[in-house]
Amino acid sequence: MDARQAVGAHGERVVARALEDQGWEVLARNWRCARGEVDIIAADGDTAVAVEVKTRRSAACGSGLEAITPTKVARLRMLVGRWLAAQDRVFAAVRVDAVAVTLPSSGPAEIDHVRGVE
Amino acid sequence: MIGRTRAVALAGLAGHLVDVEAHIGSALPAFTIVGLPDTSLSEARDRVRAAIASSSLAWPARRITVNLSPASLPKRGASTDLAIAIAVLAAAGTVDAERPARAVHLGELGLDGRVRPVVGVLPAVAAAAQHGVGAVVVPAGNADEARLVPGIDVLPVATLAELATHFGARDAVATTTDVVGAPVPSRAGPISVDLADVRGQEEARWALEVAAAGGHHLLMSGPPGAGKTMLARRLPTILPPLGDDDAIVATGVHSLAGTFDASGGLLRTPPFEDPHHSASAAAIVGGGSGLARPGAVSRAHAGVLFLDEAPEFPARVLQTLRQPLEHGEIVLHRAHGATRYPARFQLVLAANPCPCGNFYGTGERCICKPVERRRYLARLSGPLLDRVDLQVTVAPVAGASSEPGEGSAAVAARVGAARERTRARLAAHGWSTNAQVSGRWLRRETPSDSAVTVWRALDRGVLTARGADRALRVAWTIADLGERDVPSPDDVAQALTLRSRGGAP
């Protein structure tokens, strides 16, 4: 695992913990199938949420959210559908969220959570 | 999460208040501007974003929608950049939401966060004041121009950071503090010329003085080198300075055309426009895609429009002058709507007597065929010349007359006094110059013993009915210059000589 991947993995851990602190139930981390990978799949009440995490070490190049393209969102929708089909639990709704994590050199990580990206 | 500011959209000289709303929605970062923006306004997206980043302010990483309301009114140009930037910052909570909402913001943003000057600040600020807006934010380079409008607070800003700090942003830092000045138009104005430069030419000088006093349109025909252009350029120096209303309108037009230097205050010298005869109809009357920009007739509003070598202008271009001559304004219809500009100018035409230019005196040096000569001036005739009260021949200066002529100041004093007499007499009718007077008034008010020569010429058929009206109109101006209450028979006789181009009535 190189430094870049390590930063990404750390960001995902930070987000998973934060989601659980909010009372979400993290159902899968780095779930993958032939068509791709979802960073986090969690249950927000009775809604299944596919969470895409983007981690940055500074805000110099803009928010990580800007790196999430419409194509990426479309793929996440498709993947969360595949994940639903591969398990038995029933959900009332399905959603895709995006979370940007900024890890400054000192101090706590900053989390920017956008619910229900289109 | 909604920020509001205001801006002004100009359609011609008329300004409409535009509400600029920015909404920050919970969605992936995006930035859209809706509400009929044109291309340059749509590009505000990139300018605003770069300017906010350059000011060390945070760009909200969310979906930002900017709406320019009323949504049906077309908006154009970069002057809404500043309003959009402040609306976005207000929506993000970076600046106070209340204070910017009440003010009108004008200004284009540079990528470095500087606020650049824009055109049309004077009409835009005037429109804001008219709509009861209390404060307007303008680029520092346009401060002089904006302050010409009474009854509104002007806040000049040099950078976006400066304005954001004013509205309560913390941490806003300008990358540069250089003020972008307004571009000062380099135009050879007619200010440095004087009527004293013209040697001899007593008759033509007299015609020019009568034209100035009565606001009459003037045609000078004569061979090349006789001094037609020289005389025409000096007409603004003997015209009275613009009154307040005219000055504001004329300054507004020049502000919009980008030909106005605000450091000297409102435009008080009558403007002088001399388009070249290769000018297109759009250049003369105004044009451009979408909504039209003012042309030469509007820049000459309250001043002089000089067409040198008038017969060389394409007939189509000359025909476009008829509407402004008749109505004092021009309405330009384009795909995105009609634009109305003021265009009440004094027309001065200069023409050679024939294509080769030498048909004067006995005409022996002229090499043109008679048919060519006839056709040449016939290009001007018809509806256009019908409206030209003074039509004089300018002969070449004979001999070396070295006596300097009378200076502009002395002539201007007489012109001013004559205009005052005219105004006092015509005020009740809503006219201000003799050129505007109706034929009915002329026929009723001119003493019959003075007008008798005109009626006789009309009976003999050497004068048309409209020609008779023109002669009487000029006679009243001559009487005003001579400080007589009504035209004397002499005044009428003189008026007849001032419209005898080559003997043609």
Image (cartoon, coloured by chain):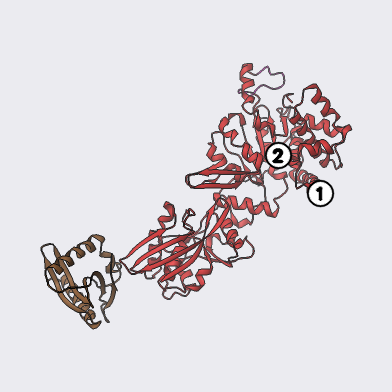
Chain colours: A brown, B red
Residue B424, which numbered label? 1
Query: Is B434 contained in the magenta span?
Result: no
Q: Kindly tell me whether residue B413 is visible in this rendering.
A: no
Query: Residue B85's spot in the image, x, y percent?
Result: 43, 65
- Using residue B183 as the reference point, say whether residue B193 is left or right of it: right
Q: Kindly tell me whether residue B40 is visible in this rendering.
A: yes
Quarter of the figure with residue B357: top right
Distance of mark 1 from mark 2, alpha carbons? 33 Å
Helix, strand or loop for disc 2: helix
Q: Considering depth in this image, is B299 or B222 the residue closer to the camera? A: B299
Q: Considering depth in this image, is B73 or B460 the residue closer to the camera? A: B73
Query: Residue B490's spot in the image, x, y percent?
Result: 86, 32
User: In the image, is residue A74 above or below residue B233?
Assistant: below
Sequence-wise, which precedes: disc 1 or disc 2? 2
Residue that badge 2 annotates: B197
Query: Residue B437's spot in the image, x, y percent?
Result: 76, 41
- The residue range painted magenta reads B354-365
